[in-house]
Amino acid sequence: MKKGKLLTKFGGVLLALTMAASPIGAFNPGNKIVAEAAGGRTFDTAAQLPANMDWGAWNEIGIASQDFYKVVLPADGVFKIGLMLKNTSHIGVDVFSSSDTARRVMTTGQMNVDDSVWTGTDTRVLSAGTYYIRVQSESPRNRSKKQSYRLKTVYESYGVSENVKDSYDNPKIYTLNTTVTDAFTATDLEDWYKVNITQEGKYRYTATVSNDTYKKVEANLYSHDLFERSFLDGAVVGTPAVTDVYLTPGTYYIKLEGEQTKYTFSLSRENIENGKVAKVKSPGKKAEITFKDVTGVNGYEIQYSTNKKFKKNVKTKSFEIGKTQTVGNDKRKVTISKLKRHKKYYFRVRTYVEHNNVKYYSDWSNAKSVKVK
């Protein structure tokens, strides 16, 4: 006999002896998944299932045995696995996010099933990647019959995924005035975005949740060093979040948190509503300026000048809401004194919102003029 054939034969005998020395189907709960039976014999050769698969054929499984499979999800999305059983004492399915069996993300199973089949399912939103499926059995209720199972997979892609887990130290870059679509999954429950604000003013945060009534997206806006925080409204299905914040130039972070849902969010610059001069009249060496009443502001500024383009001789006076007079249902009035007689003055108004001792202004309104008597 040739040397090569001898070694081959000897190796086969050694393998048989090794298998005989070990209990069939014994489960070692170590970190590495070792596939057997329908799932292949090693981690690298585990049988791959499609992400969408109707019920497969019945698979027989031995006493205290395990079968392993894997499935690849190309993007974040909803993954559902179904387990159908007959003649079992207990068969369960576990899905892991890696070859570490401590990282289980899904599970389902049932005990004491005779000839009548039983079906169990589990559904999760999962991140893009490879997942490992373990089918594990205990002793069958009726040992005279072979215990069997079938599997089914259903996958709905969200069309989004991220390759690197983000954090405060490793945020995603957000571009102002754009809408982002992202997802929270069973293994990714928070997202961090970094945004640069170059112009002080009013900004509007909006967010929507696109699936599952019981899921919610919560968010916070942080200063660059996380020392200051602004709470942003939470979003649920059918109720978008809308929050106005007032920001000075600088770097900010948006931290979003949720559970297994697809969502969108945006941060856009908004104009503060400005007033409008309704009329100006001059009963003597003063002017009475009537202007539109604007809700949600802290006060008004009146600017006046003898120059139509406000290039010279410009003065500005600020009025808190309480220092203005209500006129009708939708107007307010203030009086400017110590004006020069027989001079023509131009008046315009703007609103302001005060936040953290900083005033944020609207644009100036169009001007109206009056000749002082």
Image: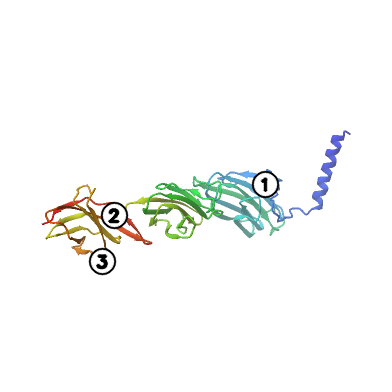
In percent of width and height, residue 358 lies at: 36, 59
In percent of width and height, residue 357 lies at: 37, 62
| Front-most of residues 342 and 252 | 342
Q: Residue furthest bottom?
A: 322
Q: Amino acid at mark 1?
A: Gly
Q: Are marks 2 and 1 in contact (CB under 8 Å)?
A: no
Query: How many numbered dots are placed on residues in this image?
Result: 3
Q: Is residue 349 left or right of residue 184?
A: left
Q: Is residue 273 left or right of residue 116?
A: left
Q: Which residue is disc 2 drawn over?
A: 273
Q: Calculate the distance from the C-alpha at mark 1 to the C-alpha at mark 3.
A: 76 Å
Q: Are marks 3 and 2 in contact (CB under 8 Å)?
A: no
| Front-most of residues 81 and 77 | 77
Q: Residue furthest right?
A: 1
User: Could you tell which of marks 3 and 2 lies nearer the N-terminus?
Assistant: 2
In percent of width and height, residue 321 lies at: 26, 64
Q: Amino acid at mark 2?
A: Glu
Q: Which residue is disc 3 drawn over?
A: 322
